[in-house]
Amino acid sequence: MAAIDHRKTLKHLYAPSAKAAALVEVPPLRFLMIDGRGDPNTAPDYPVAVSALFTLAYTLTFALKRELGLDYAVMPLEGLWWAEDMGQFRLGQRDVWQWTMLIAQPEEVTAERLAAVGEAARKKVDAIRPRAGPAGGVPRGAMRPGAASRPLRRRGADD
C-alpha cells in the first residue's frame, strides 16, 4: 500500500503561496493537542509538550501500520497562540502567551487507539508525565470546520 501524505491531499492548507495570503475552507480535522503557557523559547513545558505530541503521533503511525496496514506521514506541528490580554501578545510579551500545539491525525485514530498507545508512548519518553487525559496530557480533539485565513509568512518566528 502506498503511503498517504495528507499534506498533499490538503495542499490548500499545508502548502501556502509565498506570494499572497488567502482565505481557505478548512474541513473537519482531528488533532492531538496539548496546552501550555509561556515563551516557547524558554518555558520548560514547551519542548516537553512538543516531544509528547511527536512521540504519540509516531507511536500511533506505527500502530496503525501494524494493525490496519495504513501507512501515512506524520503531519507537521501546528500552533495556536494568544494571551488573555491581546495587547501583551501584540507587544511580544511571550512570558504571558498561551498556546495549544497540534498535530492533525487521520480519522482512524480513535479514542480507543489513542488510549491503547498512550501508555506505550509515555514509556518511550521519560519526560512525558501523567496528566489529565489518556496520553500524558495529550488529548484527542477536533477543530471546527469553516473559513480561515492562511497568512503570508516570510520572516522568522521572532520577527
Image (cartoon, rainbow, N blue to C red):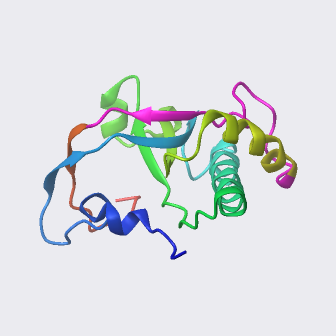
Q: Position of residue 63 (x, y in %)?
A: 71, 56
Horizontal arrangement in the rendering, residue 152 relative to residue 114 (left or right): left
Q: Position of residue 74 (x, y in %)?
A: 55, 62
Horizontal arrangement in the rendering, residue 100 relative to residue 153 (left or right): right
Residue 135 colored magenta? Answer: yes
Secondary structure, magenta segment, majority class: loop
Q: Position of residue 88 (x, y in %)?
A: 37, 32
Q: Quadrant of residue 137?
A: top right
Q: Quadrant of residue 87?
A: top left
Q: Position of residue 39 (x, y in %)?
A: 54, 44
In the displayed image of the protein, which residue is found farthest to the bottom?
2
Locate the C terminus and report the quarter of the image it occupies.
bottom left
The region drawn magenta spans 124-145
Horizontal arrangement in the rendering, residue 36 relative to residue 131 (left or right): left
Going 44% across and 68% down the picture, which residue do you hit?
Answer: 5
Locate the N terminus and report the quarter of the image it occupies.
bottom right
